[in-house]
Amino acid sequence: MTEPPGGAAADGNEEIMRATHRALRDHGYADLTVQRIADEYGKSTAAIHYHYDTKEELLAAFLDHLLARFVDTIRDIETTDPDARLSLLLDELLAVPSETQGLSVALLEMRSQAPYNDAFREQFAQNDEYLRYVLKAVINHGIDEGAFVTVDAERTARSLLSIVDGGRTRAVVFDDASELELARQVASEYVDATLR
């Protein structure tokens, strides 16, 4: 369902997103039910279904919510220096998550469902497209400013995202945050070799 901006409906939706976050963190994708989200929300399943017709619709909205949070974080990066901005973006993309391993596992489980779930696939594609756009824009800005050598910015952005995705996946699969640190180091080495 589409919600009007602001007001009680928007506040309720934010609470549902928080409840979904907690339920995914604690139960994972495989054991997630609307009832478990409702329990976290402190209301009935009908209150959830007032906003979302299906669990999949709710989870697609949750992925969109995570992207919106990331976009807000990116907007908070104050520097316009392309080199510093790219470094801060990579730091953010490969930061050790503050949430528990449970949410990271649940998100990987949802990603694995994308080939079979149109809503998930579309939302993950939108998230990926945004990240590529941001990285490509920073790279192109750096080329224009003379901070980076001329490269195919699209290809470079895709390569960086492959490093990010690989590091995140390995960190979850092996329950080892050092995989994120290694991926961050590899990303820096790639930036040095490609853009300088």
Image (tube, grey):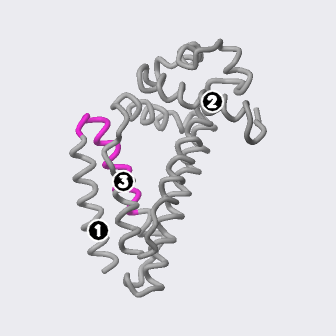
Tell me, for residue 58, which label it has, or none: 2
**Amino acid type, callout 3:** Val
CB-based contact (under 8 Å), mark 3 and mark 2: no
Residue 105 to residue 81: above or below: above
Badge 3: residue crowd in 10 Å (few <14, some 14–19, many ≥20): many
Q: Identify the residue at horizontal 34%, vertical 57% (top origin).
A: 91
Query: Within the image, what quadrant is residue 42 found in?
Result: top right
Q: Is residue 54 magenta?
A: no
Residue 44 to residue 62: above or below: above
CB-based contact (under 8 Å), mark 1 and mark 2: no
Tell me, for residue 190, which label it has, or none: 1
**Amino acid type, callout 1:** Tyr
x and y percentages locating residue 147 in the rendered image: 37, 83
- Quadrant (top left/top right/bottom left/bottom right) for the C terminus: bottom left
Label 1 residue SS: helix
x and y percentages locating residue 180 in the rendered image: 27, 48
Label 3 residue SS: helix
- List the single residue furthest toward the bottom: 146
**Amino acid type, callout 2:** Leu
Q: Is residue 173 magenta?
A: yes
Tell me, for residue 120, which label it has, or none: none
Residues at marks 3 and 2, CA–CA distance in whole angstroms: 26 Å
Q: Identify the residue at horizontal 57%, vertical 35% (top origin).
A: 62
Q: Identify the residue at horizontal 22%, vertical 53% (top origin).
A: 182
In magenta, the rendered stretch is: 159-176
Tell me, for residue 164, which label it has, or none: 3
Query: Within the image, what quadrant is residue 107 found in?
Result: top left
- Nearer the viewer's eye, disc 3 or disc 2? 2
Taken as a whole, is the magenta stretch helix, strand or loop?
A: helix
Badge 1: residue crowd in 10 Å (few <14, some 14–19, many ≥20): some
Residues at marks 3 and 1, CA–CA distance in whole angstroms: 12 Å
